Amino acid sequence: MARIGVITLSDGRDYVHNGIAGFLGGTEDRLVAALAGAGHEVVRGSAPVSANTLATSVAREIEAADVDLTVLHYCVWAFPHFTMLAANALSGPLVLVANTDPVQPGLVGMLAAGGALDQVGRRHVRLWGDPADPELAAAIGTRARAAAAVAKLRGSTFGRIGGRPMGMNTAVANTDQWHRQFGVDVEEIDQWEIVRRAEAADPAEKRRAREWLERYATVRYDSVKLTPSLLERQIGAYLAMRSLIEEWHLDFTGIKGQPELTQHFATMDVAEAFLNDPYDWNGPKETHVCATEADMDGALTMQLMKHLAGTPVLFADVRHHHADRDIWDLCNSGQHATWFAARSDDPAENLARVTLHPEVFFFPAGGASVHHIAAPGQMTLARLTRLDGTYRLQLMLGEFENYDEATTSALEAQSTPEWPHAFARLDVTAETFLSRFGANHIHAVPGDRRAELRAVCELLGITLDEFTRGPRH
């Protein structure tokens, strides 16, 4: 949830303000209670704004509280210049909220204030309704969660391990543009650090992790491409990444992998899966977004979606469209976090559906691929892509589906059965998707997060490119 500031604006005439003070306080109480009841942390202004000096001082208090979003609340006629002064002291996003009780002209106050902000180009959103209405609280919450997700990007660092993979231009972004638009720094780290640190990692922990995987997942050793020592090498790569993340204070990362590591060391599948998971053999942990093939825009998309959903984020290739079923096989060697197998808080339940297969011929260095079928359910799918250098968010709703064993095996066999799969029915035709989608990688989180992502686009000044077969919701 988010941290929301609330400032109530009032009439500047003393005799009017004194007569409506009780109404102001009661209405603000109801709005704050609704937001707190929705799980948000609310920071209230110390007093209703009834003078120009209060407009500035109360707004500065809210600014100092480091809120994600500020609600300017209108339940009476309010002098518009109070809003302008408050807005000057607030650097974050603004939502103007009007009470629709006809006893007082709150709508008039909001419209006058909003028009004044429009005149100076200060962006804001306007909402209205009963302050205790859960739908109003939900609409404010949507904006607040989007603002929090955007704010968390600013000042963060992406760790790019290796460079451009296999000529993949869509995996590489302009670091100046990232600084300017998202406030994200990029730390360049050589893949040799993974090799060096993996070999130096604690042998006892590598063994303990291997035994944990053998106990809870299915491990199919073949004595060639997947052996206990190769699996421990992959675990060592995970431990190497954990040490790099800690040492360089990396907020999210990506590993090039191909072709150097996959040909001469091991695949990064195990490392990427468990970095993105909310657990490992040591117990629960925070998820860490790590993108296969050092996909920068993919990782950035995932980081935003993680901040919104609070869950692991799927990373996959758009591998194949089964036209006879109108479903997509989202499949990629690498980092479907094992959490997606059952989406359970219990790692044993997820890992019971995971099989570690020997890597396929694309990867001569060997190691384990982390196979499972993503559990069914509604999903939001998205990807930041660039059109002529300008960012857009390509967004759609979908449904992950599961089938009987025979059907699943037949579908898997048409691509790479050793890799993880998510079978997705998307709210877009294949013709539209394949004609417009701007990358080979796509990302997903459970539930419908489109409203928050639309708000993210507004906050970042990004074009929204939403895919749907019918009217938008």
Image (spheres, rainbow, N blue to C red):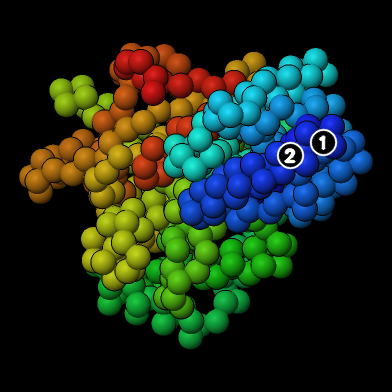
Mark 1 lies on a secondary structure that is helix
Q: Residue at x 27, y 40 (%)?
A: 400
Q: Is residue 318 visible to the viewer in this orientation of the structure?
A: yes
Q: Tag 2: residue type? A: Gly
Q: In terms of image quadrants, where is residue 284?
A: bottom left
Q: In terms of image quadrants, where is residue 95?
A: top right
Label number found at residue 19: 2
Name the residue beneath numbered marker 1.
15
Tag 1: Cα neighbours inside 10 Å, few (<14), some, or many (≥20)? Answer: few
In three-dimensional space, the C-alpha distance between marks 2 and 1, rounded to whole angstroms, equals 6 Å
Choose between 193 and 320: the one closer to the eye: 320
Choose between 366 and 458: the one closer to the eye: 458
Q: Residue furthest right?
A: 53
Mark 2 lies on a secondary structure that is helix
Q: Residue furthest bottom?
A: 204
Q: Relative to 65, say whether 399 is above or below.
A: above
Choose between 193 and 105: the one closer to the eye: 105
Q: Residue at x 88, y 46 (%)?
A: 57
> Which percent across, then down, holds residue 394?
49, 26
Label number found at residue 443: none
Q: Residue at x 50, y 69 (%)?
A: 285
Q: Is residue 294 visible to the viewer in this orientation of the structure?
A: no
User: As drawn, is 451 to the left or to the right of 119?
Assistant: left
Q: In terms of image quadrants, where is residue 213?
A: bottom left
Q: Tag 1: residue type? A: Tyr
Q: State if disc 1 and disc 2 touch (CB < 8 Å).
A: yes
**Quadrant holding the C terminus:** top left
